[in-house]
Image (spheres, rainbow, N blue to C red):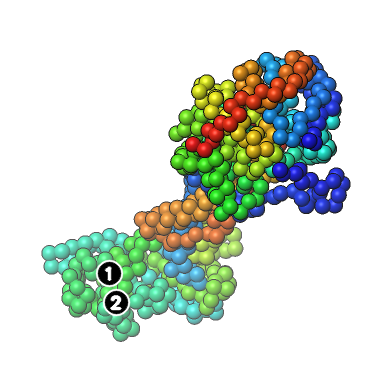
């Protein structure tokens, strides 16, 4: 397996009221293609900052970030936007759907920026929503959907451009435990189909469902273990 | 598995590799966004609409009133002037206006023969509020004694019958050519008016014709009038009060053409001064009213009035513009999170900026078109209601439209540019 993500000496320092606030200190990290990884840590440990850098939403203060053999530190903002669009799917704790758009329109959004022709967009978005079990809610707006359904729309949106990497930031943080289980099962199934998934969480039970947990404390990785745990190995909740 | 398909750094194709959302796509997306936020869109558009509509309506009303007044003055004739008697003087002391007439029939005849720039001269002697009786009806109207040149100079056409003849004038016959308002008040039809009998100052007059309606001019009803032969007026109604010759109130003069009006005025002044024995330093005992002068004075006044009205309209457009700027600014700030989401799924700063800019342009253009339509409609209604010509100056449409577009683009564009530059993380975390 090749390294999909390789980070060497990544630091991130924020400047607040004239003070330097180091959030990430010399992070070295490798994630292989097809892995299912949890980044765990308490609030303020730097796990979200690390995820933002992995997701090309933010740039590190220093260090080297190589994604699929390509050094990203030299790319400009527009090129990073293209990488987010083509290569990475995001799932956020607060879903981050556009409230005025229907589920279908929300899922079509990344394809607009990928310049996919209109007719193909509709087919692909419908397909993607069907995959997360929402084929009957295509024209619902976020306010008409439950939290779990909204997160499914967000996952459908993350998947629609067929990204190699899905980043989930506290994907179950706003959901009850039963819905959380369903969402995690969905992510597990995606991973089984070959998508590399990185989940950021403070919840050990969420982390336990991944194959590897990276633990962060105060901007440093303290433990990176391959758990080998394969929770719900043959679950097929996506085909409901 | 998808591969990160980026060309190596510094390769020539690197720039070209960037995806760009087509303009059509941006336009569709902008219109969808505007449609999905009808209230916000409507309020912003309202600012544009009110601004443009008020500019167009105000300038149209200004121009319409100006044109209608100009037309009224033109109806009097652009190559016509009127000379009226002033105050009589004895030994340099004014006896007051109307004490004795300073102009005479002989003066008008002298002008007619001695002023080369004059084409037609028509003397008149008139009295206001003369009681006219027909049977048991009676009215008070303006009685004008004149000659056959007056209908030519003032373009008075009969709608029934004829103006009185040279024979009537020479013999001083009691015949009357009546205005259409007088006809309305005293006779039921034109036909019954012709040959009808009127009594003025106890004397009988026969109606020979009815004038076409000329409407109002400078607040005066041109149809509320009776014309009789000058000779009859002078001998039967007024009596002579001139020191020498037959008194008149004044005379109309039509110059050969508009260019000759000033030389005619100069010649008239000289001849009258000579005939009245007024020295170079003396004060004229007559007045000359030149309609071209009145018109140019009026045009000046109206011009500055239109300019002022335009400035007021401009201010209303600026106020409207500030409204647009305000609501656009708020809307962009409100949508910072949306910008974050769009960026996270792959929108570049450029596509965010184009979307917001396109929204601003769509609002300005659509609002502009509605505003122009509304402005024209309101101007039309005002023109119909207050009876002035309906004129829409093209520049007002251009100015209104252009200004709203500029305001819309600046007001929508500047905050959008700032928002587009935001780091996606900060944009996502805004509430």
Picture quadrant where residue A6 is located = top right
- Which residue was labeled with disc 1? B180
Q: Position of residue B242 (x, y in %)?
A: 38, 66
**Residue B323 visible in the snapshot:** no
Give the residue furthest to the left. B136
Q: Residue at x 70, y 24 (%)?
A: A228
Q: Residue at x 38, y 70 (%)?
A: B124
Picture quadrant where residue A79 is located = top right
**For the residues bearing labels 2 and 1, Cβ distance under 8 angstroms:** yes
Give the residue furthest to the right. B10
Nearer the observer, B54 or B224: B54
Q: Residue at x 51, y 54 (%)?
A: B369
- Which residue was labeled with disc 2? B159
Q: Chain of mark 1?
A: B
| Residues behind callouts 2 and 1 on a single chain | yes
Q: Chain of mark 2?
A: B
Q: Position of residue B364 (x, y in %)?
A: 56, 48
**Residue B302 visible in the snapshot:** yes
Does residue A39 lie above or below B76 as drawn?
Answer: above
Indicate the secondary structure of the residue bearing disc 2. strand
Q: CA distance from mark 2 to mark 1?
A: 9 Å
Give the residue furthest to the front. A234
């Amino acid at each position: 397996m090749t390294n999909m993500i390789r980070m060497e000496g990544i630091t991130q320092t924020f400047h607040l009221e004239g003070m330097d606030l180091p959030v990430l200190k010399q992070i070295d990290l490798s994630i292989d293609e097809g892995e299912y990884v949890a980044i765990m840590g308490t609030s303020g440990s730097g796990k979200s900052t690390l995820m933002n850098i992995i997701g090309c939403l933010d740039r590190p203060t220093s260090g080297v970030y190589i994604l699929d053999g390509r050094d990203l530190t030299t790319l400009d903002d527009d090129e990073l936007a293209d990488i987010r669009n083509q290569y990475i799917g995001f799932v956020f704790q607060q879903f981050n759907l556009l409230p005025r758009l229907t589920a279908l329109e929300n899922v079509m959004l990344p394809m607009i920026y990928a310049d996919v022709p209109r007719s193909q967009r509709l087919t692909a978005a419908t397909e993607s929503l069907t995959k997360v079990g929402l084929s009957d809610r295509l024209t619902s707006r976020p306010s008409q959907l439950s939290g779990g359904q909204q997160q499914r729309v967000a996952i459908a949106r993350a998947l629609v451009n067929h990204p190699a990497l899905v980043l989930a930031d506290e994907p179950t943080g706003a959901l009850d435990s039963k819905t959380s289980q369903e969402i995690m099962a969905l992510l597990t199934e995606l991973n089984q189909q070959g998508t590399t998934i990185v989940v950021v969480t403070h919840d050990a039970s969420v982390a336990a469902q991944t194959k590897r947990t990276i633990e962060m404390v105060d901007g440093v990785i303290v433990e990176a273990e391959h758990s080998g745990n394969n929770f719900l190995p043959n679950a097929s909740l996506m085909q409901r | 598995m998808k591969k990160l398909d980026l060309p190596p750094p510094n390769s020539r194709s690197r720039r070209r590799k960037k995806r760009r959302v087509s303009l059509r796509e941006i336009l569709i997306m902008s219109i969808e966004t505007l449609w999905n936020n009808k209230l916000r869109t409507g309020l912003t558009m309202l600012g544009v609409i009110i601004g443009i509509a008020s500019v167009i309506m105000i300038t149209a009303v200004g121009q319409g009133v100006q044109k209608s007044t100009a037309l009224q003055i033109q109806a009097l004739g652009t190559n016509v002037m009127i000379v009226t008697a002033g105050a009589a003087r004895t030994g340099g002391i004014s006896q007051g206006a109307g004490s004795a007439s300073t102009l005479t029939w002989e003066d008008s005849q002298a002008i007619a023969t001695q002023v080369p720039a004059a084409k037609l001269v028509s003397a008149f002697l008139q009295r206001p509020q003369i009681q006219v009786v027909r049977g048991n009806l009676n009215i008070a109207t303006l009685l004008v004694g004149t000659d056959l040149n007056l209908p030519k100079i003032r373009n008075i056409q009969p709608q029934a019958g004829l103006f009185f003849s040279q024979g009537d004038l020479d013999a001083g016959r009691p015949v009357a050519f009546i205005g259409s308002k007088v006809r309305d008040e005293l006779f039921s039809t034109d036909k019954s008016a012709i040959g009808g009998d009127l009594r003025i100052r106890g004397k009988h007059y026969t109606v020979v014709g009815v004038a076409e309606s000329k409407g109002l001019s400078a607040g005066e009803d041109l149809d509320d009038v009776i014309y009789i032969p000058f000779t009859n007026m002078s001998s039967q109604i007024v009596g002579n009060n001139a020191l020498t010759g037959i008194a008149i109130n004044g005379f109309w003069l039509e110059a050969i053409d508009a260019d000759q009006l000033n030389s005619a005025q100069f010649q008239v002044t000289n001849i009258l001064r000579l005939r009245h024995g007024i020295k170079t330093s003396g004060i004229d005992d007559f007045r000359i009213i030149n309609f071209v002068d009145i018109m140019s004075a009026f045009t000046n006044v109206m011009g500055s009035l239109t300019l002022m009205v335009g400035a007021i309209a401009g201010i209303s457009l600026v106020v409207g513009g500030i409204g647009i700027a305000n609501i656009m600014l708020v809307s962009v700030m409100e949508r910072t999170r949306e910008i974050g989401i769009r960026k996270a799924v792959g929108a570049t700063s450029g596509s965010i900026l184009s979307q917001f800019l396109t929204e601003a342009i769509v609002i300005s253009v659509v609002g502009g078109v509605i505003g122009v339509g509304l402005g024209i409609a309101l101007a039309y209604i005002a023109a119909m209601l207050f009876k002035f010509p309906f004129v829409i100056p093209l520049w007002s449409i251009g100015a209104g439209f252009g200004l709203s577009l500029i305001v819309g683009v600046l007001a929508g564009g500047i905050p959008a540019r700032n928002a587009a530059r935001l780091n996606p993380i900060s944009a996502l975390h805004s509430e």
